[in-house]
Amino acid sequence: MLNIDYTAKILDLEDVIVTNVEKNDIELHIYLELPRKIHSCPQCGNETDSVHDYREQLVKDLPLGRNALLHLRKRRYRCEKCHKRFYEQNSFLPRYHRLTNRLVADIICSFSKLQSAKEIAQAHNVSSSTAIRYFDLVSHRCSALPRVLSIDEFKGNAGGERYQSILTDPEKRQIVDILPNRFEGNLIQYFRSFPSRKNVEYFITDMNPHFRNVAKVCFPSATIVADKYHVIRQAIWAMERVRKNEQKKLSDRFRKYFKRSRYLLNRPFHKLTPDEQNSLALMLEISPRLADAYRTKNEFLEVMKSSSSVVGREKMVQWLNTLNIYDLPEYSDCEKAVKNWFTEIMNSLDVPWTNGYTEGCNNKTKVLKRISFGVRNFDRFRNRILFCS
C-alpha cells in the first residue's frame, strides 16, 4: 500500500487511486481509477452515485523515463430520476481526449525551444501531426506598438512569399510581430490599423527606402534612425572594392597575399599583433590607393563614433569634402548613400538603439528554419518565431 501511495504522488494527479503498475523496456503502464463519489446529473441536476457500467480508457501521459500510458478505469453513472447516463468527471483529462492536459501543455511549451516538430513528437510519444495540431491552437496578437519600433526583412519562404518582415522593440528587447511580406502598401495598411501608432517616437530601419517611406506615411512625428551597422558597411564595401581592383594589377604572388590578408583591413589597428601590423603596412605600401581607401574608411568610423549629431554633422561634411580629394571612384556609392540618408544617419548618433537585436532574432529564425527544414505555413511560422522569443 505504501508503494501505491508513492506512485500516486509521483504521478501528481488529483484524487487518483493506483491499482497496478507494469513496465517494460519501452513503456510504463499505470492502472488507475478515481474514487467513487456523488455526481450531479448534467441533464436534471439530481445527485447520484449509482454506477451503470465501467470502461477502460488508454491515455498518454508525460514520459517518466519511458513512455507513460495510463489505463483509466472510468465509471459511467446513472441518474435514478431521469435515467441519464454520464461519465465521471476528472481534472486531468478533457472529454474525448486521449492525452492528459499536462502532456498537451508540455508539447506546446516544447515548441519554444529550437527543435523540430518531429523531435518534439518523438519525445512525447505522439505523431508529428498531433504535436503540430496542438501548437496551432496557440495564437499571438499585437495590440499596441512600442515607443521604439525596429523593422527588418528576412528570408522566410513562407505563405507563398520569399521575404517576411519582422517588427521588434529594441528598447525592451522583444519581438512585436511578424508580417507576411515586405511590400510597402501592405505595411502601410497594417500600421494604419493601430490607434496607438502615434505613440511611436523612434523608427529604426536599415537603409531600405521602402521602410523609410512607410515611416514617413504612418509615423510622421517619429524620428527615423538609420541602423549604424548598415551605414558603416557602406564604407567597408567601398574599401573592399578598392582592394579587389588593386590586387588585379599585381602579380600572382601578391594577389594571393592581398586576398588572404584582407581581414587585416577590417580589424582595428590597435588590436593587431606586431606581425599583423607589419603585414598591413606592406599592403598599404604596395598600393597607395588602398592606403587612401583604408584611411578613408577609418575616418568614416571615427565620424560614426561621434557623441552627438551636432558633432557628427560637422565631421561628416568634412569627410565628404575630403573624399573628393582622393582618386577613389569606388566610394561613389557610399557617398551617394550618405547624402541620401544624411538626416537618418545623424539621428543614429543621438540614440542608443540599433537593429542589432532584430538581426539577432533573424539569426535565430534561420536556425529554426534549418532544423525544421522550412515552414511553409506562414501562421504557424509566425507563431513559432513569436513563441521561441
Image (cartoon, rainbow, N blue to C red):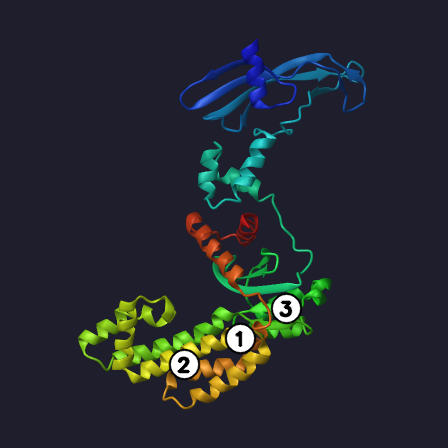
Secondary structure under the numbered disc 2 in the rendered image: helix
Vertical position of residue 97 compared to residue 339: above or below: above
Could you tell whether 328 is left or right of 158 in the image?
Answer: left
- Residue drawn at the location 23% of the way across and 72% of the way down: 257
- Residue drawn at the location 56% of the way across and 48% of the way down: 387
Q: Which residue position holds label 1?
A: 306
Amino acid type assigned to the residue bearing label 3 in the image: Tyr
- Measuring from the top left, give residue 264's x and y in whole percent: 32, 70
Task: Residue 339: tell me if it is visible.
Answer: no
Could you tell whether 246 is left or right of 128 in the image?
Answer: left
Q: Which callout, 1 or 2, points at the residue further toward the start of the chain?
A: 2
Could you tell whether 223 is left or right of 112 in the image?
Answer: right
Assess disc 2: are there few (<14), some (14-19) or many (≥20) residues with their C-alpha within 10 Å of its C-alpha: many
Question: Which labelled disc corresponds to residue 354?
Answer: none
Task: Residue 363: tell me if it is visible.
Answer: yes
Q: Which residue position holds label 3?
A: 202
Q: Which residue position holds label 2?
A: 296
Amino acid type assigned to the residue bearing label 1 in the image: Ser
Q: Which one is closest to the eye, mark 3 or mark 1?
A: 1
Are dots 2 and 3 in contact, CB under 8 Å? Answer: no
Q: Which one is closest to the eye, mark 2 or mark 3?
A: 2
Assess disc 3: are there few (<14), some (14-19) or many (≥20) residues with their C-alpha within 10 Å of its C-alpha: many
Vertical position of residue 236 compared to residue 70: above or below: below
Q: Which callout, 2 or 3, points at the residue further toward the start of the chain?
A: 3
- Measuring from the top left, give residue 199's x and y in whole percent: 71, 65
Give the distance between the C-alpha atoms of the residues marked 1 and 2, in whole angstroms: 16 Å
Q: Quadrant of residue 248?
A: bottom left
Give the distance between the C-alpha atoms of the residues marked 3 and 1, in whole angstroms: 20 Å
Assess disc 1: are there few (<14), some (14-19) or many (≥20) residues with their C-alpha within 10 Å of its C-alpha: some
Q: Which one is closest to the eye, mark 1 or mark 2?
A: 1
- Residue drawn at the location 65% of the way across and 53% of the way down: 141
Q: Residue furthest bottom?
A: 325
